[in-house]
Image (tube, rainbow, N blue to C red):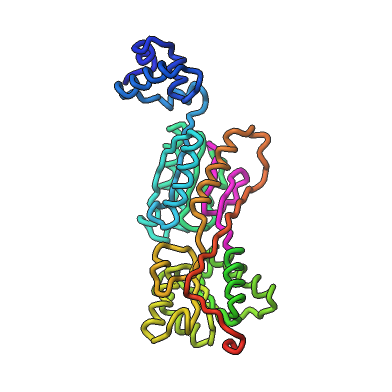
Amino acid sequence: MVTIKEIAAECGVSVATVSNVINGRSNVSVETRKRVLDAVRRTGYQPDYVARGLRKKKTNMIGIVAEDICQFSTPAIMEGIMRYCEQKNYRTVIQNLRLYARWGEFWYENDNAYRSILNPIIQEMISFKVDGLLYVAGHARVVRYFNEVMAMPTVVAYAYTHATYTPVVVLDDENAACAMTRYLISMGHRKIGILAGKADNIHTGSRLRGHQKALFEENILYNPGWVRYGDWDRDSGYRFAGELLDCGVTAILCMNDRMAGGVYDYCREHGIQVGEDISVMGFDNQEIAQYFTPGLTTMALPLTEIGTEAAAILLERLETEEESLPNTVLERSIPCKLIERESVKRITESCDA
């Protein structure tokens, strides 16, 4: 490997000057900077970040551990993380646990299987001398691993933890569902069916609370008979659409776009026109939502913002003295955004009778 000393000797400058050029410092002449950068490109010189970290006790490297990069939410979160780190001159090292690809959703309660994959990755991150760790979950849940004392500052994105020193950045599910329900009420709807996710899911519980809150504020009674619990897939939307329609609801609020797609399927097969005969809302604003006919009104997830905020919190902690950190769980909730399309119809009270 070419060393920084060899670059300095070739250019006839000091090691400190080469270091200043590589690190973008301005106290070097234009001519010298050009000569050094030309030598760096020609020789293929790469800084030894680990050696630098051992000297400075900091490598400016951040580890990113993703539960599964194939989860629809993960790429945008990681983009937010990597973009922010790049802006702050931090490099990133990525590890993909592939938990959903390995075991679907059956690994949640299998602690031994989970740790058999995660523990070696954490040790590898430690060996890389990363300054901190960002853990990107596939779905909101409580990550038990981070109840333990971590060997480095850590932030969890898109999930929760009981760990005292581990901040989390999550969706503001409750207020998002509250806003969706208020929107339906503003469009004249009082009989609102709910196509929820799995009953024991954190997203489901938070969104159902938000729905109930909006109804309470508008003096509308909550009817548990208008709630069906699906499994987040399109088939469950199709399966429960008929039951909700038979209840006489004028709108169906789906807790994700996939299940909303199932409602569309049922309505198309039974001659029911979405946006006219029944109003439908989704949640997630996945790309397919805009191609539904009619376009699906839904709630966009702030995934990139979650990644950005998680990275910002971690880098802030890296620059803060440990004794000044709060001894409490730090939770940041990022708001969602309503995307209005054509799947919700404004109705009058007479239509709602």
Q: Which residue is situated farthest in the front direction here?
A: 30
Residue 72 belongs to the span the image colors magenta: no
Residue 30: percent from left, percent from top: 43, 19
The answer to whether residue 288 is left or right of residue 25 is: left
The answer to whether residue 204 is left or right of residue 289 is: right
Q: Which residues are magenta?
A: 151-174
Q: Nearest the camera: 329 or 265?
A: 265
Residue 82: percent from left, percent from top: 45, 42
Total marks in image: 0
Q: Is residue 317 visible?
A: yes
The residue sitting at 45% across, 47% down in the picture is 78
The residue sitting at 52% across, 79% down in the picture is 345
The residue sitting at 36% across, 25% down in the picture is 46
Judge whether 333 appears above or below 30 on screen: below
Quadrant the N terminus occupies: top left
Judge whether 233 appears above or below 117 on screen: below
Q: Which residue is situated farthest in the left direction here?
A: 42
The residue sitting at 60% across, 89% down in the picture is 350
Residue 164 belongs to the span the image colors magenta: yes
Quadrant the C terminus occupies: bottom right
- The quarter of the picture where residue 105 lies is bottom left
Q: Nearest the camera: 131 or 127?
A: 131
Residue 136: percent from left, percent from top: 47, 49
Q: Is residue 197 visible?
A: no
Residue 201: percent from left, percent from top: 52, 65
Judge whether 167 appears above or below 208 on screen: above
